[in-house]
Each structure stands twice: as C-alpha cells, then as structure tokens.
Image: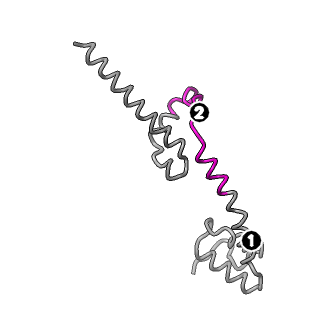
Amino acid sequence: MKTFNPPIASRSSEDLLKIVCHPNEWDDEALTQAAHELKATGIEYHERLSRQNYLRQPREKLENLRKSSESYSFLYFIFNPIGSLVEIIASYDLKEDGYFRKARQRRIIIILLLLLGFSIYLYHFFSNL
C-alpha cells in the first residue's frame, strides 16, 4: 500500500472529493484510498462525480475546438525564426495532440523548406558548370 504526503486518510473531505472527481490527476492507489475514506465517513460522492463529468464535457469540447483551430502566425516566424524552425522540425505529434491546423501547416512548411533547399542546391550546382 502506497503512502502519500500528507496521507490520504488525514485529508479533509473536500480534498478527498477533489481526488475522486479528478481521476486523471491521481494515482489509482490514491483514488482507491480516497474512495474508501469517503465511504468510511459516509459521504456520497457519486452524484458529485457525475455532475463534475457533465460539466467537464463542454470544457473539453471547447479546448479541443481551440486546439484544432490554433495556427502558426506569420509574425512568429519573423520575430522568432530559430525557435519557430526548431518547433516545426521537432513537433511531430501535433495531430495526436489535437492541433490539426498546425499539423497541416507544419507539413506544408517542411515541404516548402525542402523545395527551397533543393532549388538552392540546383542553383549552385548549375552555376558552377
């Protein structure tokens, strides 16, 4: 049995309800202990948990909508060229994180950078002949 600091048993009922209502932020053992403590004190948390889930769904939909429409700004590339280039090259999991527009822009920018590099290479190759 895991021990937490402070121990789950010594926490207030409000803290225990926060643990149970936010299962993604806590360890399975903490959830089990918090549910056991709430049951031992006679506090019903199932209604609050279902209400919390009902309220969380619109927030998650709004967050997903915001993520899917977020895009790179042209000014971002002008004022931070090295940082934006590193972000374009290193951020390969944008689609999995829900940033669909950024993923599409990243793909287009990488293709344009490759074409630019290839055309510079061809220019230098044929100018030396």
Q: Secondary structure at mark 1?
A: helix
Q: Residue at x 54, y 29 (%)?
A: 77
Residue type, numbered disc 2: Ser
Q: What x and y, as percent, mark residue 76?
A: 58, 31
The mark found on residue 128 in the picture is none
Instruction: Report the magenta stretch's main SS.
Output: helix
* Colouring of the image: one colour
Which of label 1 and label 2 is nearer to you?
A: 2
Mark 1 or mark 2: name the one nearer the start of the chain.
Answer: 1
Q: Secondary structure at mark 2?
A: loop
Seen from the viewer's position, the closer of residues 39 and 30 is 39
Q: What x and y, as percent, mark residue 117?
A: 36, 26
In the image, residue 73 above or below residue 13: above
Seen from the viewer's position, the closer of residues 56 and 2 is 56
Q: Mark 1 highlights which residue?
A: 15
**On the picture, is 7 further left or further right than 81?**
right
The residue stretch that appears in magenta: 60-83
In the image, residue 123 above or below residue 93: above
In the image, residue 76 above or below residue 45: above
Q: Mark 2 highlights which residue?
A: 73
**On the picture, is 120 further left or further right than 98?**
left
Q: What x and y, as percent, mark residue 120?
A: 35, 21
